[in-house]
Amino acid sequence: MKINILDLKEGKTEYFEKYNENTLDLKGLEFSLIGQLNAHIVIEKWRGKVKLSLEADFTLKMQCSRCLEHFERSFHEEATFYLKAGKEEVKAEKSLKDEDIYTLFYATDEIDVTPLIRDMVILVYPMKPLCKPDCKGLCPVCGVNLNKMKCHHEQVTIDPRWSKLLEIKKKISKA
């Protein structure tokens, strides 16, 4: 969605938009968007300054990094940006404020919010998605999902560097 900054009146302007996986160009990523993303876009313009606030509600389908099961998780994300016309001025040293960190510069009279919403979705995806915090994962021997059933394999894993010490312990316990 492109918004013309010059056409905006002073004060608050609100938009409600819906996006899907195609409009956000999310194909080929490790997750998929379930249904539509509902976005609430608020632009506040006052004395030549522009503040852009985004809220997005969406559901992602992803794969658990432990048990490899697919699961869905809903998200509510918010972001705020300050918009300035022109190009970013690079100075040797500058003390940054919050407003500086979240400032976006635009060269034309329009700003496209679709890439900002796309970035929100991509950045919320966890590095190691888990279906639940206490996911037990897969048995390293037989590959069964330990959340659904138990297997009878010994789950003790020993660092190979300590294996000789374990052999000594077994010899001592036999004697």
Image (cartoon, rainbow, N blue to C red):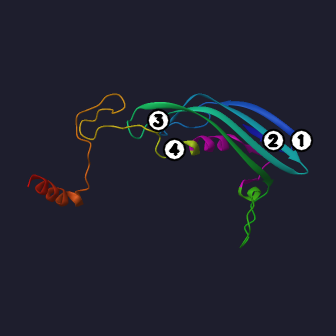
User: Which region is colored magenta?
Assistant: 102-122
Q: Which of marks 2 and 1 is nearer the N terminus?
A: 1
Task: Residue at 24%, 36% (x, y): give it.
Answer: 142
Q: Dot 4 corresponds to which residue?
A: 126
> Quick one: SS at disc 4?
loop
Residue at mark 2 to residue at mark 4: CA–CA distance: 29 Å
Q: Which of marks 2 and 3 is in front?
A: 3
> Quick one: SS at disc 2?
strand
Q: Earlier in the sequence, mark 3 or mark 4?
A: 4
Spot the residue most to the front: 175
> In this view of the protein, which residue sits in the foreground, 32 or 77?
77
Left or right: residue 95 compared with residue 44: left
Q: Dot 3 corresponds to which residue?
A: 132
- Please name the amino acid that badge 4 sits on: Pro
Disc 2 packing (10 Å; few <14; some 14–19; many ≥20): many
Contact between marks 2 and 3 (CB within 8 A): the answer is no
Q: Looking at the rendering, in which quadrant would you find the C terminus? A: bottom left
Q: Dot 1 corresponds to which residue?
A: 11
Q: Earlier in the sequence, mark 1 or mark 4?
A: 1
Measured as percent of width and height from the top left, residue 121 is found at 59, 40
Specify the quadrant of the image occupied by residue 7: top right
Q: Nearer the viewer, mark 2 or mark 4?
A: 4
Left or right: residue 147 compared with residue 164: right
Residue at mark 1 to residue at mark 4: CA–CA distance: 36 Å
Left or right: residue 142 compared with residue 102: left
